[in-house]
Image (cartoon, rainbow, N blue to C red):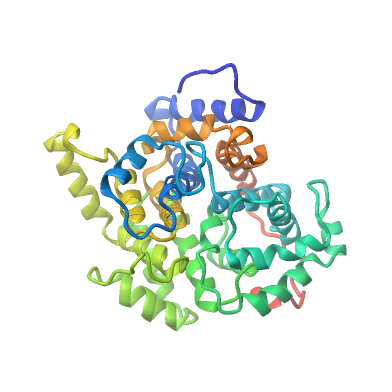
Amino acid sequence: MDNNNNLSEGQKQAYLILQRLLQAKKEDQDYKELRAYGCIAGAFIGDSLGSYCEFENDIDEKVLSDVIMKQPGGGTFNLNPGQLTDDSEVALSLAYGLIEGEGKLDLNLIFKYYGIWILSPPFDCGITLGAAFGPSKRFIPSENWTSQQMQYQDALKHNQQVVKQENYKSQSNGSLMRITPLVIFCLNLSEEDTIRAVRAEIKLTHCDETLIQACISWVLVLKELINTGDAQKGFEKLKNYMKRNDCDKTLREQWYEQYVLKDEMKMIGTQNMGWLKIAWTYGLKFLKNWGIIEDKFQSFLKEGRDKMVYKTIYENLIAQMIYLGGDTDTNACIVGGLVGAIVGLQDLPELYLKNMLYCDVQHSNKQRHERYAPYNAFIVCEKLLKLNKLEIIDNYFKGDKLFKDSYD
């Protein structure tokens, strides 16, 4: 990656991280670390690529190939190349809350950053998250507020009242689009603590049990992929979750057995746009068939790379998600996190990484605060990996009626 003296301080920090990761000798590379970075970056890149065609029902293949190969500016929201939508901005907000908690899962701090985001204001926001984060408008949190100040405002109490009243049936993908920082946070936690953590965080926006368990199973799978680098072990983790006595029946029978296990059964991207089931089932189908996908890709490579439209597995699978139409940015974001967790940062196209680093959101057609610049993915991942070494989860809200069922 080329050096550049005109970078902001944050960009310089991200540049040094990328330089360390990508220029290390092969024998010195930490592939688990690369998969962790690949997980977050893969999600953010998918979000950016998918934003060009969002809400479209009929996507032209030539336009799609230009988007994947060139990552131009423009699209539905007229964004800069590499710029993020609400999907990844909310993920960054989650990351900031986790980092400020210094190894403790502090929902007050996470909700503070969600409040800062909703008040920024974003250029796009889904209905479910808009409702869940709406209580922030009562007290307008600032970045220097402590957890105690948030607690004093009864922020979570107001949040949970709204979620239970407005979002009780929601199975929207606004839940999983933000999850990759929590995956990194949970890497060294036990399975049961991971389940507790995901359940508690997802309940800030959703309370449908099928959706909550879909998010839990997804995080467990991504953890396994990052920790082992083995797609087969990742799918085994999913199968084991589906065998649990407490696994949600709808998730097991109507999502996993009916769609993931049956290759002929496929969700339609333009129907029920925003439904988590679309990205969840497609992503896990890719995982189930990963060996076949790799074999086909290698056979294409032997025929000649110059004949291939897409040069990497990541590009190919993201193109498939976008071609579905509908909520393309979120579907590509969710699946991009899974694919990135398998292939690692080193196998993501350099063009995408450069655009993440150099994207200037403060001078975009959709101007944003620098905290929402895509290069922050590398900075927060580094910090989360350091926190992760603490291997603890806070239980300060254990016994609180709002979250008691998450910890029983």
Instruction: Please name whichever residue, 126 or 291, is drawn nearer the observer in this view of the structure.
Output: 126
Q: Quadrant of residue 57?
A: bottom left
User: In the visual, does 101 lie left or right of 247?
Assistant: right
| Image spot of residue 14 (x, y percent) | 57, 31
Q: Quadrant of residue 75?
A: top left
Q: Is residue 396 above or below residue 34?
A: below
Instruction: Please name whichever residue, 155 or 83, is drawn nearer the observer in this view of the structure.
Output: 83
Is residue 72 something that shows in the picture? Answer: yes
> Image point 49% across, 38% down: which residue?
82
User: From the image, which quarter does the N terminus lie in?
Assistant: top left
| Image spot of residue 351 (x, y percent) | 40, 31
| Image spot of residue 237 (x, y percent) | 40, 64
User: In the visual, does 88 lie left or right of 402?
Assistant: left
> Image point 61% across, 28% down: which residue?
13
User: From the image, which quarter does the C terminus lie in?
Assistant: bottom right
Looking at the rendered structure, the number of numbered marks drawn on it comes to 0
| Image spot of residue 306 (x, y percent) | 18, 32
> Image point 47% across, 19% down: which residue?
2
Hey, which residue is sitting farthest left in the picture?
A: 303
Q: Is residue 327 above or below residue 69?
A: below
> Image point 63% across, 41% down: which residue?
383
Is residue 397 something that shows in the picture? Answer: no
